[in-house]
Image (tube, helix red, strand yellow):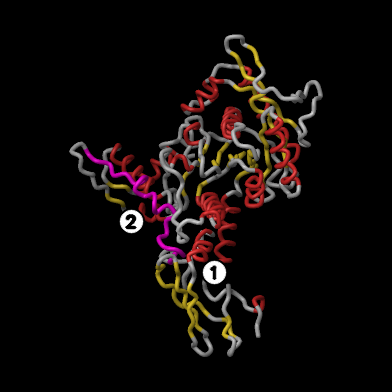
Amino acid sequence: MKFLCVPCDSPMKLQTVGPPERGSLSVVYSCPECGYEMAMLTNPFETQLVQSLGVRIGPDASSTEGTRAGGTSCPFAAMMPATEVALPDQAGEPIPVRWTSGAEARLANIPEFVRPMARTGIERFARERGTLEVDEKILDAARDFFGM
Amino acid sequence: MKGYHDIVGDGGSRVLEQVADQRTRITDGLAGVRHLVAVGSGKGGVGKSTLTLHLAGALRARGLRIAILDADFNGPSQARMAGVQGALFVPGSHKVALPRTRNGIGVFSMGSLIPESESLEFESAAQGESHTWRATREFALLGEILGSVEWGALDLLMFDLPPGAERTVQYADFLGPRTSFLLVTIPSNVARGVVARSVAALSKGPNRLLGYVENMSGYFCRDCNAIKPLFVSPEPFDAAQGRPSGLEIPCLGTVPFDPELARLCDTGIPLAELPETPVGRALEHVAQQLLDTLESTTPASAHGSRELRPGKEPRR
C-alpha cells in the first residue's frame, strides 16, 4: 500500500507506527513536500492480514526493535506459559544461570518462537555440566551434542 | 497524478521487501540441499508421516544426509515418531541448529516445541476469524523455519505435508519448482480418488511428480508370516498383474501394514532396530526407487551432477 499527496503529487513517507490498540494500528505518513500528515488506522482484520505475512511495520523495519504489526513480536505469545518452564533446584528454587553477551546475541538470532524453549534447555544443559554460565562454548557443546 | 507503479518503494513499511528478503533467506538456506521432496497425498490417514520417517531411515542407513521438516503444524507427528519430542533447539552462529535423531536424521517438528496437550495457537489481532488469515500465517511460519534453521549440506530434505489436496498445491506453490512430490495412497478407491485430484492439481504446475507409494497394501501377519488383505477394493491395484491404480504417475512400490512398525512409531524407535521383515524390505525397495527416480529425473545442470552417495557423518 502506498500513499500519495495529491496536491504535491508526491509519495508520502511513513513516520511512526502507534502501538496496537484493540487490534488497530495507527500508521502516520507525511508528505515530504508540504509536511501534510495523515494516519492510516487499520481494523483488526487488516492488522492481522499484515501480521500473517510475518513482516514488521515501522520506520526502520530492518531493526529487530521494530514493531511487529498486531502486538507482541512472538506469534506464540499466548502459549508461552506452556513452553517456558522454570527449572527448580533441589530446594525448589530456580537456579539463576547467567548468559554472556555473546551467547545472548546468538540466542537473539534464532526464531522468537524457539527462544523460550532453547533458553531453558540450554540452561539445563549448562547445569548438568556443572556451570551456571552460558557462554558460546556451552552453546557449541550443546550444538555438537544435539544438532546435525 | 502518479499511479501506484510510478512510485518507487512503499514509503517506509517495506512489506514487499521483507517478503522478498524472506524468500532470499530460504533460497540461501537451502542452497546446500541436493533434493527437496515433499511427501503428500491429499488424503489424511494414509501414512505419509510414517513413510516419510522410514524412508528417511532407510536412506540414512545408506549413509545419506537426510532431514525432515514436519510441515503439518497443526498435527505434528514426526517429533514423537522420530524420538525428538524433547529436542533442544540450540542457537548456532546465526541460525538455529537442526535437532537430530539418534540415527542421525535431522528433524524439525512443531511437536518438539508444543506439548501434545496443546494446540498450535497464533496471537491474533482479529480476535478469531482465523479462516481469513490462518493459512497465510502458517506459510509465514514455514518460511521462518526454512530461513532460520541450519540445514547445511544435505542429500535430501523431506517435507511431511499435512492432508488436503488444496493444501498440497499450496505447498507446491510455496516451496517452488525445486521441490519434487511423492504421493501416498492406500488400496482404497476413496483414497486413490483424492490422490488422483492431487495428481491432477500438481500436474498443472512446474513441480516434478516422482510417483506414488501404495501404503497399507495388506498387513503383515506375524503369526502366519504372510501378507494378508487389509482393504477390500473393487479394483485392487496389482502392479505385477497390470491392474491399474488410476493414478497417472509411476508406482514406486507398495508397503504392507505392520502392527510392530506402528508400535515403533509410537515409541520413537528407528526401523533399523526392527529385524528384517517384508515391511522393511518393501521400504528398502521404495527408498531405492526414490533414489533412482531422483537421479534419473534431475537435470545434469541443476544443483550439481554428482550421484547421491554417502556423505560424512553428522557431527556428534
* Spot occupied by residue B307 in the image (x, y as percentages of width and height): 69, 36
Q: Secondary structure at mark 2?
A: helix
Residue at 47% over, 30% down: B102
Secondary structure character of the magenta stretch overall? loop
Farthest residue in the right direction? B242
Farthest residue in the left direction? A91
- Above or below residue A105? Residue B159 is above
Name the quarter where the N terminus of chain B is drawn. bottom right
| Label 2, residues with CA under 10 Å away: few <14, some 14-19, many ≥20 | few
Instruction: Looking at the picture, tell me which residue is in the foreground, B17 or A51.
Output: A51
Q: Secondary structure at mark 1?
A: loop
* Residue mark closest to the camera, 1 vs 2: 1
| Numbered disc total | 2
Q: Is residue A77 magenta?
A: yes
Instruction: Looking at the picture, tell me which residue is in the foreground, A127 or B184.
Output: B184
Q: Chain of mark 2?
A: A
- Above or below residue A112? Residue B48 is above
* Spot occupied by residue B224 in the image (x, y as percentages of width and height): 61, 9
Q: Quadrant of residue B291?
A: top right
Give the amino acid type for the residue marked by disc 2 in the picture. Answer: Ser
Q: Which residues are magenta?
A: A67-89
Residue, disc 1: B14
Residue, disc 2: A101
Q: Is residue B271 magenta?
A: no
Give the amino acid type for the residue marked by disc 1 in the picture. Answer: Arg
* Spot occupied by residue B250 in the image (x, y as percentages of width and height): 76, 33
| Label 1, residues with CA under 10 Å away: few <14, some 14-19, many ≥20 | many
Name the quarter where the C terminus of chain B is drawn. top left
